Image (tube, coloured by chain):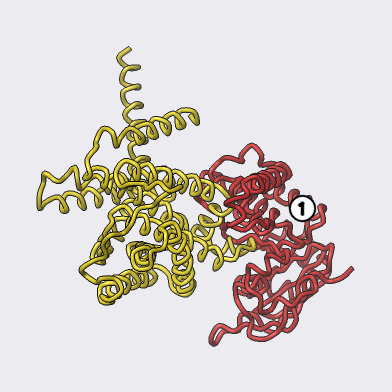
Amino acid sequence: MKSRKNIIGIVCLIVAVILPWLFNSTYYLSLFGQTLINIIIVFGLNFITGLTRNMNLGTAGIMAVGAYTSALLSTRLGISPWIGLAAAILVGFLIGRGLGYPSLRISGVYLSLTTIAFGEIVRLVLNNTTSVTGGAQGLTNVPVFSIFGFQIQRGIPFYYFLLLFMLLMFWISTRIVRSKWGRAFKAISDNPDAAESLGIDIAKIKILAFTLAAIYAALGGALYGNLMGYLNPSTFNFDFSINFVIMLMIGGIGIVRGNIIGAIVVTMLPELLRFLGDYYQLVFYTIAFIGAIKLPQGWPAGIVSLVKWVARKTGSKSRKEG
Amino acid sequence: MGDILNVSHLTKRFSGLVAVDDLSLTVKERQIHTLIGPNGAGKSTTINLITGVLKGDTGTITFAGKDISDMPTHKIAQLGLGRTFQNIKLFGAMSVIENLMVGAHKNTSQGIVNFLWNTKRAKDEEEKMRAHAEQVLKQIDMYSHKDDMVNELPYGLRKMTELGRTLMIDPKMILLDEPAAGLNPSERQEFIQHLKDVYDSGIDLFLIEHNMDVVMSISHYITVINFGAKIAEGEPKEVVNNPEVIKAYLGSRFKAE
């Protein structure tokens, strides 16, 4: 079973490596880049919404802060995007702490509302501080990374850069989820009374989950700026935050591998549904809605149990016939 | 022998109702101490006060020489006070061994930043936790169930898992809220034997129990409360012959003995 999973992983990786050569156009490369960034952000959301079950609907806001921090440092002050990336991690850390503390006093719907408010405040501030951020005009000429004097150009090189980054974050996430931290995250949402009775400081664990989520989102935001070369506050709206939750749901809550699938489906599906024109959103959200009701464990788990069910049915049929 | 737990003049009111009324009790080291009393006598409230889930209005609680009256629950647990719950509280989405490993969390020292770069230490710590959990599972005869999901276990084994999980915190004392409730007679015998083994391994026990067979077979000392106040305490034999205890709780069937 484990070796089969490894083979699937290797096949996926090979596909990911040759993909840009099969669809070598600016449009597709940008789409693939966005997919990789979304995967990273969902990894983060998995900690707070997936494992500790605190609905975070402000992901786009956190992402925006990360994106603008990095982009402003490099466009306005000419600082290397690498330092911008480090700065994004730092602001992610601070936001995580800042959003984590209210989560100790409020929970459920009220916490979700707080995170929505955070996202909206960020968007409005970015829109209205025109002199710094460029406001609704957007921020242009976000530079690309360079390594040992070589620029990582947008297109295929940056795609591989993002792929490596995603794999690094995948490795970190998997390790955290399978460790004492992952168990503690699950424990405090599953049964907080029991977790406390075992000496686990719920406040500390909750803030850690928020901080990880925010760092991943801020990092994703910074990379987004570098990928697009252009930022606009209207990108980071509430719909975008919702999309991350849908990715998490589709992939199966709490499952790191599932996060990847969810992010790919939600980022690519609108492109595949483009032929529907104005109706694409209706179709997309209907699919997501049905998925949420019928496959609460996520699509991959749902498909696996469907395959097993079909195999059992046909298996018993053939036995009867034979 | 010193005192492991000392409750002194503890009172807790829920608006008009006095749930615990000026209660004082002392649990000595190396003793199995049982708290009994009729329904609504304030037993569960007392456990919740001791473990810091509720805060008392007046009175002090000391555990292992430290004042824990105002400590949050997790700090009290970190001092080595374990507990099990009246209606089992397990982590349903996890396997038996994972449940136990959550119990080892407080005894680990590696922080998250160190965890990310020091992979070797992270691995060592994880293996140590797993080995500890496996050892406890062997001790409570549950090793063969280690990878079962707790939600799929029968009731008796869920109770055992909860006991195993609290053993993982390396407790000095365990509070057990009705450990025999819901167990059939043979499971009950087995559970009592495991409790005695736990006690023999050096951990003091404080029980709330309704089942008088269990109480009489395991307790060294009994405290009886009614309407939140202590009405009697002493060795099991004296307590069951105390007329007030018979009137309030046991009923006349115990009189003859």
Quadrant (top left/top right/bottom left/bottom right) for the C terminus of chain A: top left
Q: Tag 1's secondary structure?
A: helix
Residue B168 horizontal side relative to residue A205, left or right = right
Circle 1 is placed at which residue position? B198
Q: Position of residue A105 (x, y in %)?
A: 47, 75
Residue B7 horizontal side relative to residue A215, left or right = right
- The chain assigned the colour yellow in the figure is A
- A251 up-or-down from B232: above or below: above
Quadrant in which residue B8 is drawn: bottom right
Q: Nearer the viewer, residue B150 or B218?
A: B150
In the displayed orientation, state which residue is furthest to the front.
Answer: A149
**Res A49 visible:** no
- B3 up-or-down from A37: above or below: below
Q: Position of residue A29 (x, y in %)?
A: 27, 43
- Count of marks overlaid on the render: 1
Please name the residue shown 30% across and 35% down the image: A19
**Res B115 visible:** yes
Residue A110 horizontal side relative to residue B38, left or right = left
Q: Nearer the viewer, residue A121 or A152?
A: A152
Please name the residue shown 82% across and 56% down the image: B202
Q: Position of residue A154 (x, y in %)?
A: 30, 47
- B149 up-or-down from B179: above or below: above
In the displayed orientation, state which residue is furthest to the right.
Answer: B1
Please name the residue shown 52% across and 62% down the image: A208
- B226 up-or-down from B111: above or below: below
Which color was chain B given?
red
- Amino acid at pointer 1: Val
Please name the residue shown 38% across and 64% down the image: A78
Quadrant in which residue B32 is drawn: bottom right
Q: Nearer the viewer, residue B248 or A142?
A: A142
